[in-house]
Image (cartoon, rainbow, N blue to C red):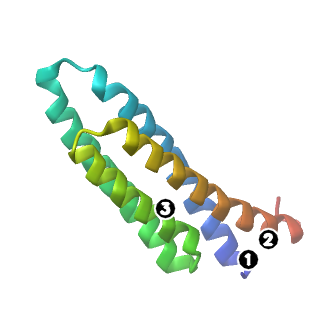
Amino acid sequence: MDLKLALEAYTAAEHIKNSLIMASQLLAAVPSYPEAERPGGARTLVTVLEVVRGDAQRAARSTGDQSFQRAAEGLSEAISLTESRAFEQAAERVGMAISQVTTAAQGAWGQLSANGFV
């Protein structure tokens, strides 16, 4: 991986990881909403997850790192589970996506570090 690609991968990974952490917090919150508000909360959460999945897919295409693609696949599962109101299982899939994105960040960090950039 060249340095430009490593910097792009690291930047994308950190952005996506932050978004995933926010999504996992929302997944924990929505079940505590009043019953009448849960459907709207779930729809909003699906939209957030779709945006983050798009970010992961773009990162996979631009960097070639398959960890981003695996994260996007996990987010597709999380979206389906959220639509089914299986929030706990969706949170597990988001956790797996965080792990995949962290793997991408570690690889990029290693490359940047080896070249004295961090």
User: What residue lies at 79% left-to-right and 71% top-to-bottom?
Assistant: 111
Q: Nearer the viewer, mark 1 or mark 3?
A: 3
Residue of label 3: 71
Q: CA distance from mark 2 to mark 3?
A: 21 Å
Q: Looking at numbered disc 1 in the image, what kind of residue is underneath it?
A: Leu
- Pinpoint residue 38: horizontal percent, then vertical percent: 19, 29
Name the amino acid type tagged 3: Ala
- In which image quadrant can residue 30 be found? top left
Name the secondary structure under disc 3. helix
Residue at 26%, 48% (x, y): give it. 46
Q: Is residue 45 above or below residue 3?
A: above
**Distance between the alpha carbons at the discs numbered 1 and 3:** 23 Å
Residue 107, quarter of picture = bottom right
For label 2, the residue is 111
- Does residue 4 appear to the left or right of 46 in the view shown? right
Of labels 2 and 1, the one closer to you? 2
Q: Is residue 36 left or right of residue 86?
A: left
- The quadrant where residue 53 appears: bottom left
Decide if residue 10 is in sight here. Answer: yes
Rendering coords of residue 33 (x, y %)? 24, 20
Q: Residue at x 72, y 81 (%)?
A: 1
State left or right for residue 41 relative to residue 114: left
> Could you classify mark 1 by the number of other residues whose Cα lies within 10 Å: few (under 14), some (14-19), or many (20 or more)?
few
Q: Which three-letter amino acid code belongs to the residue tagged 2?
A: Gln
Q: Between disc 1 and disc 3, whose residue precedes?
A: 1
Screen quadrant of the C terminus = bottom right
Kindly state the secondary structure of the residue where label 2 is placed: helix
Q: Circle 1 is placed at which residue position?
A: 3
Q: Mark 2–mark 1 contact, CB under 8 Å?
A: yes
